[in-house]
Amino acid sequence: MRRTEGVHKEVILFGYGKFGRHMYAQLSQSGYRVTLAVMQESNYQNAVEDGIEEIRRFNPKRNSSIKMLDIDPQKHLLYCAMDHTSSNLFLVLSLHELFHDAVIVAVSNSDENTRKLKYAGADTVIDIYEASAQHLVTNLTKPAVSEALNTIVFEKNDLKIAEIVLEPNTMLEKKYVSQIDFYSRGLILVAIIDKELGDELIYIGKGVDHKFDGGDTLILAGRSNDILAFRKELSGA
């Protein structure tokens, strides 16, 4: 039976790119002792420049290299934060095969990858975009700001937030969220401010299928060009 995260105070963090770098900071601030395992030379140099001392090089495609990290499933939490999904997935598979009792946490950037990582053996999957969507709603209703998510998801990926008020008789009128493919438009529908419900903020999570009406305000995340294209689509331009 696997142990829970709460009993561990040491972490082996795989990767020190755009995800791993900020995860290292968060874990360290939470009181964990973190050993960094990196594959790329650029990650290693960045870690050295940041003053990190516990750094190990490894090759995720060689089990012998992973074993040399001296992983103890009873002591270490394993965080997979490689920048490339394929690398993360391969690493989770290898870790699960080598250390059946280890607690494995992995970073994902889509629902599909989340499913794959769980099938591969990850105990916990952190969906960056799902987390950022909830984070945005929190910021709309409370003053608290999570700097790590802002940097990882928005600054690094050039994403913007837009509020679009639906005019009457647009293509969305009387349609439901499930009928509109925001993903293919490069957009994430984060929330809706519903005019009929007295400007209530509705977080678009799992199980929510809101019907669009004129006067609703859509809160969207996406790149500037994709947001502009969607505005034009709504106006019929």
Image (cartoon, rainbow, N blue to C red):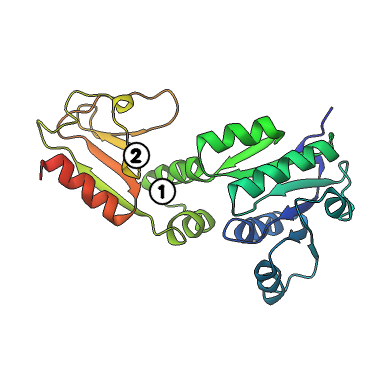
Q: Residues within 10 Å of mark 2 (few under 14, many from 20)?
A: few
Contact between marks 2 and 1 (CB within 8 A): the answer is: no
Q: Which residue is mark 1?
A: 139
Q: Amino acid at mark 2?
A: Ser
The location of residue 100, given as percent across then percent down, is 84, 34
The location of residue 123, given as percent across then percent down, is 70, 34
Q: Is residue 73 shown left or right of residue 231?
A: right
Residue at the spot 49% in from the left edge and 40% down from the top edge: 130
Task: Give the mark, 2 or 1, whose residue is nearer the N terminus.
Answer: 1
Q: Is residue 140 shown left or right of residue 149?
A: left
Q: Is residue 6 visible?
A: no
Question: Which residue extends farthest bottom?
Answer: 49
Q: Is residue 220 visible?
A: yes
In the rendered image, the quadrant that contains the N terminus is top right
Residue at the spot 26% in from the left edge and 49% down from the top edge: 227
Q: Amino acid at mark 1?
A: Asn
Q: Which residue is mark 2?
A: 184
Q: Is residue 75 above or below residue 174?
A: below
Disc 2 is placed on an element classified as helix
Judging depth in this view, the residue of 232 and 40 nearest the camera is 40
Between the C-alphas of marks 2 and 1, the distance is: 26 Å
The location of residue 81, given as percent across then percent down, is 65, 51
Residue 49 sits in quarter: bottom right
Residue at the spot 83% in from the left edge and 51% down from the top edge: 66
Residue 115 sits in quarter: top right
Residue 215 sits in quarter: top left
The location of residue 121, given as percent across then percent down, is 72, 33
Tally the numbered discs: 2
Disc 1 is placed on an element classified as helix
Q: Residues within 10 Å of mark 1 (few under 14, many from 20)?
A: few
